[in-house]
Image: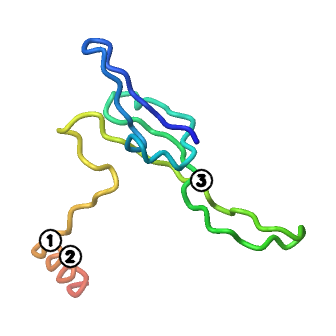
């Protein structure tokens, strides 16, 4: 079990960035700061679904590691969130295709 933590030097407080205290059950590793200081990226082995191995008579954990991003400030938006298209913009594109 490993946890990614962030330490605030000014307040001398340490924060759990990847798991909540007392519930450490995953292996988090390779933390990396965003160049702009908006996010903390890390890898985590969280999908522990056993799969029968085709060559060894045992189970393995294929595709168990995924990347994660933690926003470091409240004003940072989710980089994976895409706002919905405005209906008017979508309708105009459809009309332009019909005119051609």
Q: How crowded is mark 1: few (under 14 residues within 10 Å), some or many (20 or more)?
A: few
Q: Label 1 to label 2, Cα distance in Å? A: 6 Å
Q: Label 2 to label 3, Cα distance in Å? A: 40 Å
Residue 65: assigned label: 3
Of the 4 image quadrants, the one containing the N terminus is top right
Image point (12%, 76%), residue name: 87
Q: Quadrant of residue 51?
A: bottom right
Q: Name the residue under label 1.
A: 89
Residue 93: assigned label: 2
- Horizontal side of 1 relative to 62 (left or right) equals left
Of callouts 3 and 1, the N-terminal one: 3
Q: Number of labelled discs?
A: 3
Q: Label 3 to label 1, Cα distance in Å? A: 38 Å
Residue 79: percent from the left, percent from the top?
32, 49
Of callouts 2 and 3, the N-terminal one: 3
Q: For the residue labelled by badge 1, is the local secondary structure a helix, a strand or a loop?
A: helix
**CB under 8 Å between discs 1 and 2:** yes
Residue 11: percent from the left, percent from the top?
25, 15
Q: For the residue labelled by badge 2, is the local secondary structure a helix, a strand or a loop?
A: helix
């Amino acid at each position: 079990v490993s946890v990614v933590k962030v330490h605030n030097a000014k307040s001398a407080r340490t924060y759990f960035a990847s798991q909540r205290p007392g519930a450490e059950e995953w292996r988090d590793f390779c933390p990396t700061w965003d160049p702009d200081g908006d996010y903390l990226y890390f890898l985590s082995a969280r999908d522990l679904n056993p799969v029968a191995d085709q060559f060894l008579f045992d189970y393995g954990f294929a595709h168990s590691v995924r990347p994660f991003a933690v926003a470091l400030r409240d004003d940072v938006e989710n980089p994976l969130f895409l706002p919905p298209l405005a209906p008017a913009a979508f309708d105009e594109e459809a009309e332009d295709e019909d005119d051609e």
